[in-house]
Image: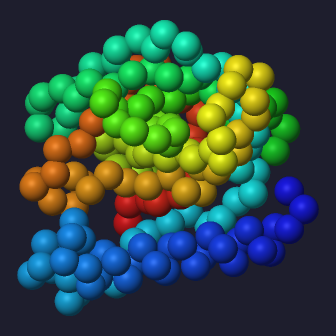
Amino acid sequence: MDDVDGWRAELEEKRAEKDDFFAEHPQSPIPPAEREDFEGLSYFDPDPDYRVSADVTVHDDPDIALLETTAGGEMRYLRTATLSVELPSAGPDADPVDTDLAGYRQEGAEGETLFVPFRDKTTGQQTYAGGRYIELSADRTLETGDKIVVDFNLAYTPFCAYSEAFDCPLPPEENWLEVAIPAGERDD
């Protein structure tokens, strides 16, 4: 990445906008009675090592994936792509870890946004026990062989972590990572 300072400034701006939304917006997941005391979300420090390039494999005839939800139900998604990434692993001398992540689109949804729910070794310890999400938007329709940036610094906690009024899909086992991803939103 060439412009780390620009990337960091843009990331910090997005985080500030999200904190404002959570504190003030009528659709905030923070219950209204708790918004006055809301001081902002917690984040891992920005780390460009967790902004990685993924090789894309598009599934022309996507499988249906039934994702369990926090309220005990299921949501129907289509497994539209596989993202192959190389992730940093713990320790300065540790080798990177190659892994695949499934990218989904809710059945019936329009658009090209990929929904990537995941768990990692921080889940339930430093991050929300239900996992975190990333949403990836490409500037065009993805094809097999394309590359897309997966920035784990944008990983976020689903709204159901803040209010039982929300029912959120849980990351399926195929997106349970065997490494820690100390990037994005975290628990206090």
Quadrant in which the N terminus is drawn: bottom right
Quadrant of the rendered image containing residue 141: top right
Q: Position of residue 89 (x, y in %)?
A: 70, 37
Check the image and name the residue furthest to the bottom: 36
Residue 156, located in which quarter of the rendered image? Answer: bottom left
Percent of width and height locating residue 75: 22, 29
How far from the left and from the top, in percent, is residue 169? 27, 36
Q: Is residue 14 left or right of residue 109?
A: right
Q: On screen, 175 above or below 163? A: above
* Residue 9, above or below 162: below
48 vs 75: above or below: below
How many marks can you see? Answer: 0
| Residue drawn at 21 percent across, 70 percent down | 27
Residue in view at x 90 percent, y 62 percent: 2
Q: Residue 48 at x, y = what percent?
A: 75, 57
Q: Does any portion of residue 90 appear in the rendered image?
A: no
**Left or right relative to 55: residue 22:** left
Q: Residue at x 71, y 50 (%)?
A: 51
Q: Quadrant of the C terminus?
A: bottom left
- Can I make out residue 24 in this image? yes
Q: How is the image coloured?
A: rainbow
Taking 37 as reference, is 130 above or below it? Answer: above
Q: Which residue corresponds to the image point at 12% horizontal and 79% vertical from the top-left?
A: 32
